[in-house]
Each structure stands twice: as C-alpha cells, then as structure tokens.
Image (cartoon, rainbow, N blue to C red):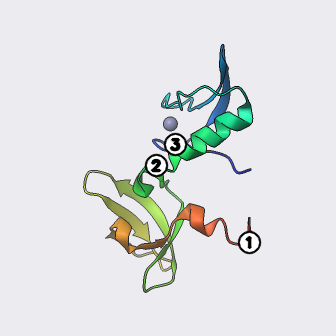
Amino acid sequence: MKTLKCPLCGEELAPSVQRYGFEYVCWKCKWQTASLCSTEQGAKKAAQKLISKFPPIMRLNQGDNVLIWLRDDIYTVLGTDLEAGKIHLQDVYGDADSYYPTNIKKWPWELDQKGGNE
Ligand SMILES: [Zn+2]
C-alpha cells in the first residue's frame, strides 16, 4: 500500500502505537488521526478515509504533478495559496501561473493510479 501523507504539511505519516491501539501521526506538525484502531491496518484505513475528506488543494505538495484541463500537459506544483484558493503551477517550459482547483483535471493521487491498481 502507498504511504500516507499528512494532509496539512505533506510529511509522511507514521503509525503510532498508543496504549489502546494504533493511529497515524505526523511528527512534523503533530496532526493525528485521533481514532484508535486495534490493528495497524485498520488505523491506516481510518487515516486514508480521513485524509480523503480534506480539500484536494490542501493535499498538494511542492513538486507534485497535476494535469490541467484543455492543455493535457503535466504541470508541477510550485506552491499553494490556501487563502486565495489558488495553486501555483509551472509548465514543462518553465512558465509559472496560478490556477484554481477547478482547472485541475487530474490530481497527483489520480495520476499515480496509472498503471497501478487497475
Ligand atoms: Zn503534518
């Protein structure tokens, strides 16, 4: 299974054994799934479910690749402006511009699936 990334800062989440079960935590920003499961696998599933509820823009990290509608080119994420709801992207020619989440055709985790699970 793929590694889980913190929906807030993008660090890799690590399983953590608590007194009453497992959960996933981010060592960097201290985000945690806060729902204890009896197995590590269960904790991972719970974490995935929780992360999927975060808005996609919050789950983007610098260096991620996305696909833009109408261009069908891969763009690289330079950064995000959560307050403005904008994503700063760079195209293959090195030009940078800002886009809204609605301009995104495929998010990194949708691109990853290519040749993966299916
Ligand atoms: Zn974090």
50 over 107 or under it: above or below: above
33 displayed left or right of 112: left
Query: What is the x, y in percent for residue 52?
Result: 51, 50
Give the foreground label among 3 and 1.
3
Image quarter for residue 84? bottom left
Residue kind at label 1, given as amino acid type: Gly
Query: What is the x, y in percent for residue 17?
Result: 69, 21
Residue kind at label 3, given as amino acid type: Leu
Q: Residue at x 48, y 80 (%)?
A: 93
Q: Residue at x 41, y 53 (%)?
A: 55
Binning the other alpha carbons within 10 Å of mark 3 as few (below 14), some (14 to 19) or many (20 upward) gives few
The circle on residue 50 is: 3
Residue 58 visible in image: yes
- For label 1, the SS is loop
In three-dimensional space, the C-alpha distance between marks 3 and 1, rounded to whole angstroms, equals 25 Å
- For label 3, the SS is helix
Image quarter for residue 5? top right
The residue beneath circle 1 is 115
In three-dimensional space, the C-alpha distance between marks 3 and 2, rounded to whole angstroms, equals 5 Å
The answer to whether the residue labelled 3 contacts the one labelled 2, judged by CB atoms less than 8 Å apart, is yes
2 displayed left or right of 10: right
- For label 2, the SS is loop
Query: What is the x, y in percent for residue 73?
Result: 51, 81
Q: Residue at x 52, y 45 (%)?
A: 51
> Which of disc 1 and disc 2 is earlier in sequence?
2
Image quarter for residue 104? bottom left
Give the foreground label among 2 and 1.
2
78 over 17 or under it: above or below: below
The residue beneath circle 2 is 53
> Which of disc 1 and disc 3 is earlier in sequence?
3
In three-dimensional space, the C-alpha distance between marks 2 and 1, rounded to whole angstroms, equals 25 Å
Number of marks: 3
